[in-house]
Amino acid sequence: MGEHAAVDRVDEPVTVSTMVEDLRGLGVEAGDTLLVHSSLSALGWVCGDAQAVVDALREAVTERGTLVVPTHTGQYTDPDVWSNPPVPDEWIETIRDERPPFRPESTPSRAVGAIPECFRAYPDAVRSRHPTFSFAAWGADAEAIVEDHQYDYGLGERSPLARVYERDGAVLMLGTSYDTNTSLHLAEYRAEFPKNTVSNDAPVVEDGEVVRVEYDDVATDTADFEDVGAAFEAERGDAVERGSVGDADARLVDQPALVDFAVEWFETNR
């Protein structure tokens, strides 16, 4: 969506203060643990762009709460399976050998949107170490949520997703839907159904030295995430608050309720 269209969609600029008011109306409270999935373009014309959204989120949960965002880095996945776009076979070893190491403090996120990329660059944000599935956090429990992010099974029990679950956190979807809801991956890991394991390796920095780490993961699949979300809202509407933030459709979802429901759904339907 172009900027002209963004201006036409709203009657007045979307600002930090109006977004805080909208978030409060949705049910976001000071002290919450909030995992945020977001689309900047869905909000309409935002005065201050992604920075204003980050500031509004911080103001809404306050320093007593904790914000968490995905800062994933698909550039460190296995280039042999890239499809959008694929790369020539003769490039693959060069990519593996020559890409610089993942550095939590500086490596850009990829394909998660402008808001997480802005968020992770704030000087008081912290980011987990996983070279593919990192998360950034800010607030009271930020360090505890991102520390010791296990390389193996990076969206599982020793991931920030599980730490949000332990804190009875919520998922805020700003102009996004369940197809990008990473908490459903935690449910995939927990559910008992036939799974495939995939392996990857990536360069990271440990104790000041560049090393290559190898790690295993579950072959995840988002194709049915929208179906899970629809079934969850039909059965557990009490666990979802819907409203608007700016011009974006927004949902505030009880994360443990969603994960527990999705575990049973996957075991029945996969």
Image (cartoon, rainbow, N blue to C red):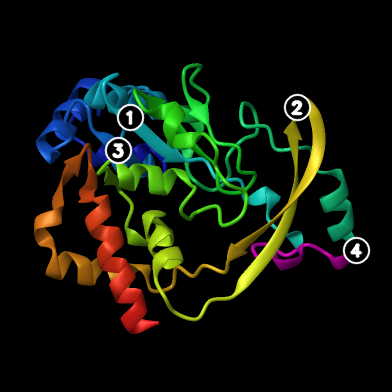
Cα gap from disc 1 to disc 2, whole angstroms: 28 Å
Q: Position of residue 22 (x, y in %)?
A: 15, 33
At mark 2, the secondary structure is loop
Residue bearing mark 1: 66
Crowding at dot 2, Cα within 10 Å, few <14 / some 14-19 / many 20+, comes out as: few
Of badges 1 and 2, the one in the foreground is 2
**Quadrant housing the C terminus:** bottom left
Cα gap from disc 3 to disc 2, whole angstroms: 31 Å
Of badges 3 and 2, the one in the foreground is 2
Of badges 2 and 4, the one in the foreground is 2
Instruction: Give the number of the disc on residue 43.
Output: none
Crowding at dot 4, Cα within 10 Å, few <14 / some 14-19 / many 20+, comes out as: few
* Highlighted range, magenta: 80-89
Q: Position of residue 104 (x, y in %)?
A: 62, 32
Whether residue 222 is visible here, answered yes or no, is: yes
Foreground pick, 247 / 188: 188
